[in-house]
Amino acid sequence: MRPVSIVGIGSTRFGRHKETPLDALAASACRDALADAGIGAPEIGALYLGNFIGGVLSGQEVLAGLVGHQLGLPLSAPCSKVEGACASGGIAFRQAWMSVAAGLCDFAIAAGVEKMSHAGTARVTEALNCAMDQQRDGPTGLSFPGYFGMAARVYGEAHAEWRSHLTAVTRKNKANGLKNPLAQMGEDVSAETVEHSPLVADPLRLYDCCPISDGAAAIVIAADEAVKERLSRAGAKAPIRIAATVQTRGAPDVASIRNLLSFEATVEAARQAYRVSGLSPSDIDFVELHDCFSLTEILDAEDLGVVPRGMAGAWTREGRTRPDGDMPINVSGGLLAKGHPVGATGVGQLYEAVRQLRGEHPNPVNDAAIGMTHNLGGAGVVCTVSILKRADA
Amino acid sequence: MRPVSIVGIGSTRFGRHKETPLDALAASACRDALADAGIGAPEIGALYLGNFIGGVLSGQEVLAGLVGHQLGLPLSAPCSKVEGACASGGIAFRQAWMSVAAGLCDFAIAAGVEKMSHAGTARVTEALNCAMDQQRDGPTGLSFPGYFGMAARVYGEAHAEWRSHLTAVTRKNKANGLKNPLAQMGEDVSAETVEHSPLVADPLRLYDCCPISDGAAAIVIAADEAVKERLSRAGAKAPIRIAATVQTRGAPDVASIRNLLSFEATVEAARQAYRVSGLSPSDIDFVELHDCFSLTEILDAEDLGVVPRGMAGAWTREGRTRPDGDMPINVSGGLLAKGHPVGATGVGQLYEAVRQLRGEHPNPVNDAAIGMTHNLGGAGVVCTVSILKRADA
């Protein structure tokens, strides 16, 4: 596999895009990424598009082909939708990386898109349940808030101060979101507001849950050897090296999950990402991780090894995961504040990491040279982890 | 990219599987393929699963993760669903090939699955429309039978004997299906029965259309260097070499399609498959192609270059595409008779081609050494073409 870098990024704002069709939303992010890269559509050799629920909520599949056509990609460019629930975007990125790293093409686009807000909360909740094992968990009436509510109860048994841990995650991410113009709902929110917001799935409250979001993000990936001469041009942005991008699987149903406070898919993905990159947790300068609920950020940070096991809640409360802390987490606002347009989320995390490594982020982390992204599907049935590096790092 | 072969195949019967859940159907085909290969689940490094409409018709996504769990694949094995409407299976195969050819793993599974019959014709017709461009063609009320009906009218303007051409395709494929135990509806059918069957989309009649099907198929792919020592074992089946597997895109909406009698995605895919394999149409011993309607077989055969342009109807009527003809097409019965469980179809075609090349097919082609498969999505928005070779060819 040859060295590969990110050379262009694009994103819509995350939030509500009721009037923009699903395909147009994705195409818009892709055009931004191509413009950012200074690469024309005819040069693109493959498009991978992460999307979870466009069939159910918008009656639209073959979305990658539609977007490829709108962009004017060559007929020879494979355009494929990939799906792994909330990790669909991370899968799209890894597939695009694979195409270029394997030498099948020099340039590829990884994109992700979702449109949910038009459908209303009841239909969205039902649609999200497509990420559940319908044979085993479906008939029990379990939902994703329900699953993470159960996990939060278990967390509460281990941590007497569980409520303040969860509140600290929400307050930090909401505050980070305020500084990110792409974020759906940044807010300077008090502990009291968080802790008195309506119960969604006891003990999780409204402020513990990410919102329903529309949005799209896109990344242009290039073989390092193909962009060498471009870099000498005026105005060319520094490519960001892909040090690792891995994908793993985990148990899909509650009865098969051994520990509600750890996702085996994340633990395995982190192990592999460190192995492939030759890096260790202490090398990581910041992490964008999958905080679909406030609790999930705590579990993810521990599974990824960037915070000691059992300590993520306390670290968050102490401010150690803020942008100026030891291990900045979700500087973008994360899913809780930036939003969670499901298929776009994984690509959006990479977008944020690239902005950070380029020194272009509106909420900068000092001397950020190496960043990690973590995208989780369902209740841990699929996970992708990527590590990005500045070329000089 | 290193040399890669098919070392195991599995398939359910195509037809009705109302009582078997989607994930179990896919897992069953995968287990058959692993058993056929003599390879254990722990050795598998990746699973790609083609599925089109499991979200809409069964409320089930993250299907690849569910199947990977049921098979007991390693946590390190990426399990991804891929979607490109009726070409989802072909995409899955190409992605699995890519993983092994790039050296990311030595063994991978490509699978495809669909369950449709439980939903009834009206819901299935609506669901299939997810493969249409909803912004441009959706509001016109167009359906896929409607699209291919329009194309058949154009074909009729160019070929006075159009009806006998279409009838000949149906009669051949139905007869071939009779010899295939996996086929949903083989039949010894008269021209009169075909030509007096109910109109579906004028001028296409019921016998011009493939049925609504459930089913799954799976393929185990291996790096040649990883299976060398296995081949010396007693009972090991000869691996079938993947000479080419390519994917292209085409226009997704009617207004963008220049010629209703040719799919640009197929023309481009055939060109690439010949280039990659170093073969030409005259080297191909048989073709399994995407006959979603009788007319489509004629267009596909000409687009693939295995029959001269404008001659496929006449060739079919003259028996030249029968198993004992110059260019055997859809010896399996094709989509028209074997059935079309959408996401499984592309993998099912490869299953049929491998049986043929191993000399195990119930409807054998004499001295078959090189076979081609062709899988088309929507009205040509995506296409995959593969060429398989006997190791001694």
Image (cartoon, coloured by chain):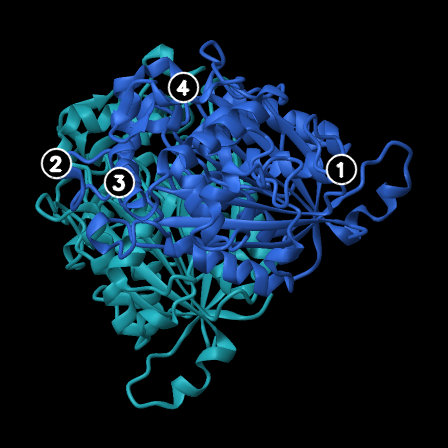
Chain colours: A cyan, B blue
The amino acid pointed to by label 2 is: His
- Residue at image x 49%, y 28%? B113
CA gap between label 1 and label 2 equals: 52 Å
Please give the chain letter of the residue carrying mark 1: B
Q: Crowding near pointer 2: few (<14 within 10 Å), some, many (20+)? A: some
Dot 4: element: helix
Kindly indicate whether the residues beneath marks 4 and 3 are on one polypeptide chain. Answer: yes
Determine which residue is flagged by label 3.
Answer: B153
CA gap between label 2 and label 4 equals: 50 Å
Determine which residue is flagged by label 1.
Answer: B358
Mark positioned earlier in the residue sequence (4 or 3): 3
Dot 3: element: helix
The amino acid pointed to by label 4 is: Glu
Please give the chain letter of the residue carrying mark 4: B
Residue A138 shows up from this direction: yes
Determine which residue is flagged by label 2.
Answer: A118
Determine which residue is flagged by label 4.
Answer: B192
Kindly indicate whether the residues beneath marks 1 and 2 are on one polypeptide chain. Answer: no
Task: Locate residue B371, reporting x and y percent.
Answer: 64, 46
- The image quarter containing residue A210 is top left
- Between circles 4 and 3, the one closer to the viewer is 4
